[in-house]
Amino acid sequence: MLQAILFDVDGTLADTERDGHRVAFNLAFRDAGLDWHWDVATYGELLSVTGGKERIRHFIETHAPARPAVDDLAAWIAGLHKAKTAHYLDLLQRGEIPLRPGVKRLIDEARAAGMRLAITTTTTPENVTGLLRATLGEDSPGWFELIAAGDIVPAKKPAPDIYTWTLEQMDLAPSETIALEDSANGVRSARAADVPVVVTINDYTADDDFDGAAAVLDQLGEPDAPAETLAGPAPD
Ligand code: XBP
Ligand code: MG
C-alpha cells in the first residue's frame, strides 16, 4: 500500500533552474571575476550533469573556459559553488521562485491523508529548506520526515543512491512509495531503485526520455484555476 511520496525539488516542486540556479551561477561567476556566462541554451545542455559542483567541473572539462591556475581545483569549485548557493538563497528569499501548479495542493492533501513525505534531490540542503520556507512557510521543512539532499550520497542522480538511502532511512519498500520527478536523470535514479515515478515535465525536460515512468504529465494542475493561468491563453 502506498505510504510515502518522495519529492524531487528542482524542476518538480518549482521551476528553479532557468531563473534561479542559472542566474545564481552567473552571479557567482561575476563576483569571482570570471567572464563565464551560462545562457539559457548552454545551461540546458549542462543540466545533463546533476549537482552544481559537478556541473561546474563538467563545464571546465568540456568548454575549457579561462580560469585562474589553482592548486586544488575541487576546493576552488567548492568556493565558487558556495557563493552560488548564497545568491540562490537570496533569490528564494526575494520570493522570485514560486511553486509549480498543484504542488501545494498535493502536499496539503497528502498530509491530511496521513501520507509520509520526503525530499530526494541532488541540490544543496539549504536550497531545499530555503525554497520550502519561502513558498510554504517557516514550519514547512518539518512536514518532511526526511530531506535527502546534496552530498549525502556520493553518487548523485541518475544513480539510484539517493532513493536507496531514503528507502533505508524510512524503512520502506519501493512499492510503498511513489516519486515525483521532472527529468530523465530523476526517472533513471528512481527506477534504478525500483521506485515508481510520475513525471511533470518542464521546458528543459519536455524532450527527455521518460522510459519506465508510470505517468508523464505537463503539470499537476489546479482544478479551480482559469485555464489561461496553466497553459497560456485559452483558444478563442
Ligand atoms: C537538480 C540539480 C542541482 C541543481 C543545482 O537535479 O542537478 O544540481 O541544478 O543545485 P534534480 P546545486 O532535480 O534531479 O535533483 O547547485 O545545489 O547542486
Ligand atoms: Mg529535478
Image (cartoon, rainbow, N blue to C red):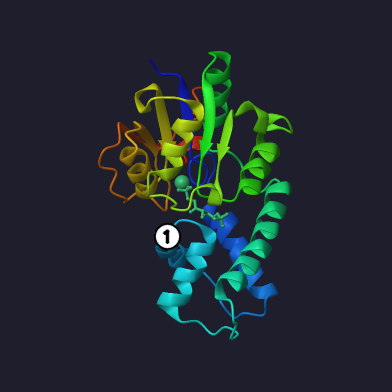
The answer to whether residue 227 is seen in the rendering is no
Q: Is residue 42 left or right of residue 149?
A: left
Quadrant of the rendering where the N terminus is positioned:
top left
Circle 1: is it few (<14), some (14-19), or many (20+) Cα within 10 Å? some
Mark 1 lies within 8 Å of ligand 1 (Cβ measured):
yes
Q: Is residue 219 left or right of residue 32?
A: left
Q: Which residue is mark 1?
A: 49
Q: Look at the picture and state if 7 lies above or below 155.
A: above
The count of marks equals: 1
Quadrant of the rendering where the C terminus is positioned:
top left
User: Which residue is at a point 37% across and 33% down the rendered structure image?
Assistant: 198
Q: Position of residue 88 (x, y in %)?
A: 65, 55
Q: Residue 99 sits in which quadrant?
A: top right
Q: Choose between 128 and 109: the one closer to the eye.
A: 128
User: Which residue is at a point 63% across and 69% down the rendered structure image?
Assistant: 80
**Type of the residue with mark 1:** Val
Q: Position of residue 220 (x, y in %)?
A: 45, 31
The answer to whether residue 188 is seen in the rendering is yes
Q: Position of residue 81 (x, y in %)?
A: 61, 64
User: Which residue is at a point 70% across and 73% down the rendered structure image?
Assistant: 31
Q: Residue 73 sits in which quadrant?
A: bottom right
Q: Is residue 157 left or right of residue 121?
A: left
User: Which residue is at a point 44% across and 69% down the rendered structure image?
Assistant: 58
Label 1 residue SS: loop
Q: Position of residue 216 (x, y in %)?
A: 33, 36
Furthest residue in direction left, as rendered: 211
